[in-house]
Image (tube, helix red, strand yellow):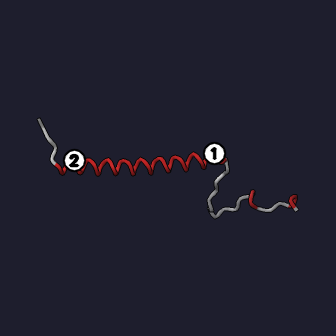
Amino acid sequence: MHQDHELHTRRKGRNFGILGVLFAFVVLIFGLTVVKIQTGTYAEAFDHVVRPELVPSEASE
C-alpha cells in the first residue's frame, strides 16, 4: 500500500529519541519534587525581609 520514505523513518526515530529525553527529564523533576516534599523541611528563599524566626531570642542564651 503505502511505504514511508526513509527520511520519515529517520525522523520518527529521532522523535522517539527526543520523547525519551523529555520523559527522563520529567521523571527527574518529579523525583526531585517528591524527595523535597518528603524531607518535610520548610524551604525559605532570601527575600530581603526580616523574619522573626531567624532573629536570636534572649531565651536561647
**Residue drawn at (11%, 35%) of the image:** 1
For residue 50, side relative to residue 19 (left or right): right
- Earlier in the chain: of badge 2 and badge 1, it is 2
- Tell me which corner region of the image, top left, top right, bottom left or bottom right, holds residue 57: bottom right
Q: x and y percent of residue 15 in the render?
A: 30, 49
- What secondary structure is found at the residue carrying circle 1? helix
Question: What residue sits right under mark 1 in the picture?
Answer: 38
Q: Which residue lies furthest to the top in this view?
A: 1
Could you tell me the amino acid type at mark 1? Answer: Gln
Question: What residue sits right under mark 2 in the picture?
Answer: 9
Q: x and y percent of residue 51 in the render?
A: 71, 59
**Residue drawn at (24%, 50%) of the image:** 11
- Tell me which corner region of the image, top left, top right, bottom left or bottom right, holds residue 46: bottom right
Q: In which quarter of the image is the C terminus?
A: bottom right
For residue 58, side relative to residue 42 (left or right): right
- What secondary structure is found at the residue carrying circle 2? helix
